[in-house]
Image (cartoon, rainbow, N blue to C red):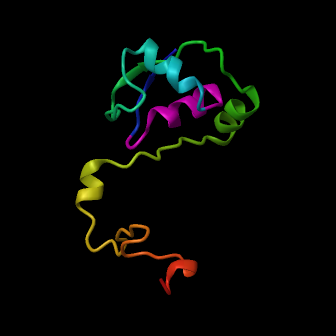
Amino acid sequence: MKIIIRNNQSLLDVAVQYRGTAEAAFEIALANNISITDDLTTGQELIIPNTRYYNKIVSEYYEGKGFLPATSISDDFINNLVDPEIGEMIININFKPKALKNS
C-alpha cells in the first residue's frame, strides 16, 4: 500500500495509523530507505509493507474513527516559539532536590 504523508506526521504516527503499533515503524523505514528519525515531508509518498508487527484492533479503530495522527514538531516550530516559559534545570546546578537543598 502507498500513502501520502500529511502535515506534521511522523513515522511513528504512520506506523500506528496503518499497522496499529509503533514497532512497525522500523520495517516501514526500511521499506522506504529512510531512517526512523527522518522528518517526513507533507505530500511525501511512503510504502506501507506488511510487517511482522500488526495490531488489527488499533489499526481498525483508527480507521473506523477517521483518526489521522500528526504529532511531529519541526525544528522551525521550536525555533519560532516566543517565550515558551520552559527553561532548563540541571540537577545539582540550578535544581536541587529537597534532600540536597541544605547542603
- Which quadrant of the structure image shows residue 39? top left
Image x and y of residue 91, in percent: 43, 68
* Residue depicted at x 52% and y 14%: 1
* Residue depicted at x 59% and y 32%: 22
Residue with the most extreme bottom position: 102
Image x and y of residue 62, in percent: 65, 38
Nearest to the observer: residue 3 or residue 84: 84
Q: Was residue 18 drawn as part of the magenta stretch in this picture?
A: yes
Which stretch is magenta? 7-21
Query: Taking 30 as reference, is 55 above or below it?
Result: below
Name the magenta segment's main secondary structure. Answer: helix
* Residue depicted at x 28% and y 74%: 83
Residue with the most extreme right position: 57
Image x and y of residue 95, in percent: 43, 75
Q: How many marks?
A: 0
Query: Taking 84 as reference, is 73 above or below it?
Result: above
- Which quadrant of the structure image shows residue 61? top right
Q: Was residue 23 drawn as part of the magenta stretch in this picture?
A: no
